[in-house]
Amino acid sequence: MSLLSNYDSLWKAFVRPYRQTYHEYDLGPSSFLLDTVSVRRTDLILKNKRGLPLKCSHYEPFNIKTKQSEAAPCVIYLHCNTGCRLEAKPAVDLLLPLGISVFCFDFSGCGLSGGEYITLGWFEKDDLETVIRHLRANPRVMKMSLWGRSMGAVTASSFSNQPSVIYSPPDNQHPEKSKQKTDIPNGNNRSTAGLAYYNANKPH
């Protein structure tokens, strides 16, 4: 194999890693019961700065009596470089019973969103900015907290100084492995799951 071929394979490994594909039905039912909390999932498409469609889902507590989604703090889940919004399911299972909504999406170049390549945080921060702008205009979103994994964590760190957005330190752990760590964080035993819960509920 020539040096040129090796170089070509190397850069493609970074900008075009394995792309997880799925069908919309893999997201499951749009309304369901989680513990004692009724949940409604709203699927939507946002356009980023480059005009690429971002496939998104917003899981919210749902009031059966009023048939409306309830106002709640929101955690934006940011998937890894080979992931997609399906990765957020354990976060949904963890946070919705606590009264926290979860917004997840496929970065451009990932999952069902538009685009061919990823940039490990460079263009992904524009995708996140698009999502934050959308959520800031949503009266049901009280506060926002970021939970990022791998590439998602790098992207989240770009917004550590954003007003009305609370940044949780990076997490390379899958949310399934953080399920039992939901205490308010203290000392060096902070889990990202706990921080997401704490940050989404603490006053600004």
Image (cartoon, rainbow, N blue to C red):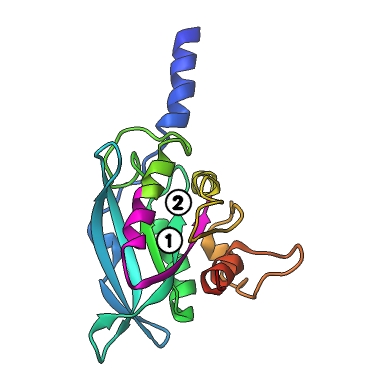
Q: Residue at label 2? A: 79
- Which residue type carries mark 2? His
The secondary element bearing badge 2 is classed as loop
The secondary element bearing badge 1 is classed as helix
- Where is residue 96 shown, x and y percent of the image? 43, 76
- Where is residue 37 shown, x and y percent of the image? 39, 84
Can residue 195 be spotted in the picture?
yes
Can residue 1 be spotted in the picture?
no
Marker disc for residue 88: 1
- Where is residue 192 shown, x and y percent of the image? 60, 62
- Which residue type carries mark 1? Ala
Seen at 58% across and 58% down, the residue is 168
Determine whether label 2 and label 1 are within 8 Å by CB.
Answer: yes
- Where is residue 9 shown, x and y percent of the image? 45, 21
Q: Nearer the viewer, residue 163 or 191?
A: 163
**Bounds of the magenta segment:** 130-149
Seen at 56% across and 70% down, the residue is 179
Structural crowding at the residue carrying mark 1, measured as other residues with C-alpha within 10 Å and reported as few (<14), some (14–19) or many (≥20): many
Structural crowding at the residue carrying mark 2, measured as other residues with C-alpha within 10 Å and reported as few (<14), some (14–19) or many (≥20): many
Q: Quadrant of residue 113?
A: top left
